[in-house]
Image: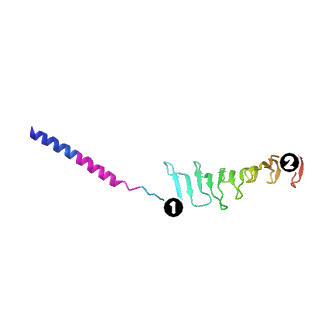
């Protein structure tokens, strides 16, 4: 009876030591997490190693790719130091951009395939909010805005950018 108790205690002690040793080994196998990672470029890939997103140390910033690996969306900090978001078509041309200007204005622009901006929504630093429409040459043809002092204006322009109609 004493032998069976000693045997059980020995087995239990061996189990406890084995579990403790395994916990120690597992703890040693995992290196501590790095607090800082540095690189010029990170690429996120899918299970087939196809690049789906890129984070790069460039004005392009963070890019998201389509299934073919082409960049289709970019969040970045262009050279002027203000944030911007761009949505690109299949050719890489920016078609929609959301940005701020260095003077604090906010702008949403939509462009044609040729890259010429067709529509601008702008809120300037003084609070003026406007919708501006451009012709095929990229020049303004119509504007509707409300100034900071709550005065509204609507204008239509010819090719030479002369107002042909406006109210008030």
| Relative image position of residue 54 (x, y in whole percent) | 56, 54
| Relative image position of residue 72 (x, y in whole percent) | 62, 50
Image-quadrant location for residue 6: top left
Residue 26 falls inside the magenta stretch = yes
Per the rendering, the mark at residue 161 is none
Q: Nearer the viewer, residue 13 or 148?
A: 148
**Residue pointed to by mark 1:** 39
**Residue pointed to by mark 2:** 155
Looking at the rendered image, the disc whose residue lies closer to the viewer, 2 or 1, is 2
| Magenta segment main secondary structure | helix
Q: Is residue 56 left or right of residue 120?
A: left
Which residues, given as a range, are shown in magenta? 16-32
Q: Residue at x 60, y 57 (%)?
A: 61
| Local secondary structure at mark 1 | loop
Q: In this view, does 103 lie above or below 13?
A: below
Q: Nearer the viewer, residue 159 or 164?
A: 164
Q: In this view, does 99 lie to the left or right of 41?
A: right
| Relative image position of residue 103 (x, y in whole percent) | 72, 58
Q: Is residue 154 left or right of residue 53?
A: right
């Amino acid at each position: 009876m004493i032998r069976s108790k000693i045997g059980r205690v020995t087995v239990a002690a061996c189990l406890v030591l084995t579990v403790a040793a395994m916990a120690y080994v597992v703890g040693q196998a995992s290196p501590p997490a790095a607090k800082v990672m540095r690189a010029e470029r990170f690429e996120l890939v899918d299970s087939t190693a196809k690049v789906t997103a890129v984070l790069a140390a460039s004005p392009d910033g963070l890019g998201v790719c389509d299934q073919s690996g082409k960049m289709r969306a970019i969040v970045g900090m262009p050279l002027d130091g203000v944030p911007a978001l761009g949505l690109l078509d299949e050719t890489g041309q920016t078609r929609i951009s959301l940005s701020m200007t260095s003077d604090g204005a906010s702008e949403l622009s939509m462009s044609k395939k040729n890259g010429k901006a067709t529509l601008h929504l702008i809120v300037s630093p003084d609070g003026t909010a406007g919708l501006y429409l451009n012709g095929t040459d990229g020049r303004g043809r119509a504007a509707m805005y409300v100034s900071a002092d709550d005065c509204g204006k609507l204008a239509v322009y010819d090719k030479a950018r002369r107002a042909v109609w406006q109210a008030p």
